[in-house]
Image (cartoon, helix red, strand yellow):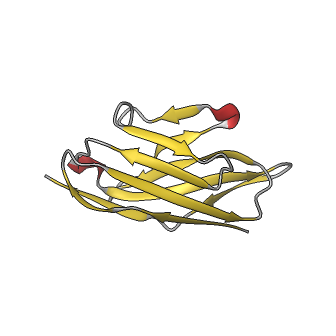
Amino acid sequence: QVHLVESGGGLVQAGESLRLSCAISGNIYMINAMGWYRQAPGKQRELVAHFLSGDITDYADFAKGRFTISRDNAKTTVYLQMNSLKPEDTAVYYCYVNNGIVRAYDYWGQGTQVTVSS
């Protein structure tokens, strides 16, 4: 089993910044991908940013230039620095990892609420 615990969400005003953290523990065999999704009320969950194999990063268009994903060398913590936040960034942010060698599975955190007021 793999456990993910997000932190760092909160209520901020438009234009401010937040840094989300996700601590990963458990039976880590091989992390093939790790990163962040978000889900706003009434909308589908969408990719924010993630690391793919080979340390390649991929960002959603709305995140480019404002959000930065990073992680520690041990791949046990992944961060999301969010700058210039907008009201439309309001959502629950979820951390995930894809873990496994022969068979790989996605594991998710419980989510952290980010609310941006105008």
Q: Is residue 87 left or right of residue 54?
A: left
Residue 90, horizontal then vertical, whole percent:
29, 55
- Is residue 45 at least partly visible in the picture? no
- Is residue 53 at least partly visible in the picture? yes
Q: Is residue 70 left or right of residue 86?
A: right
Is residue 26 placed above or below 50 in the rendered structure?
A: below
| Along the line of sight, the residue nearer the viewer: 3 or 40 | 3
Residue 73, horizontal then vertical, whole percent:
66, 45
Is residue 10 placed above or below 13 in the rendered structure?
A: below
Q: Quadrant of residue 68?
A: top left
| Residue positioned 59% across, 40% down in the render | 51
* Quadrant including the N terminus: bottom right
Q: Quadrant of residue 62?
A: top left
| Residue positioned 40% across, 46% down in the render | 81
Is residue 66 placed above or below 28 in the rendered structure?
A: above
Residue 7, horizontal then vertical, whole percent:
44, 64
Spot the residue most to the right. Answer: 102
Spot the residue most to the front. Answer: 73
Q: Is residue 84 left or right of residue 113?
A: left
| Along the line of sight, the residue nearer the viewer: 21 or 87 | 21
| Residue positioned 78% across, 49% down in the render | 30
| Residue positioned 36% across, 62% down in the render | 9
Is residue 79 placed above or below 67 in the rendered structure?
A: below
Residue 80, horizontal then vertical, whole percent:
45, 48
| Along the line of sight, the residue nearer the viewer: 66 or 106 | 66
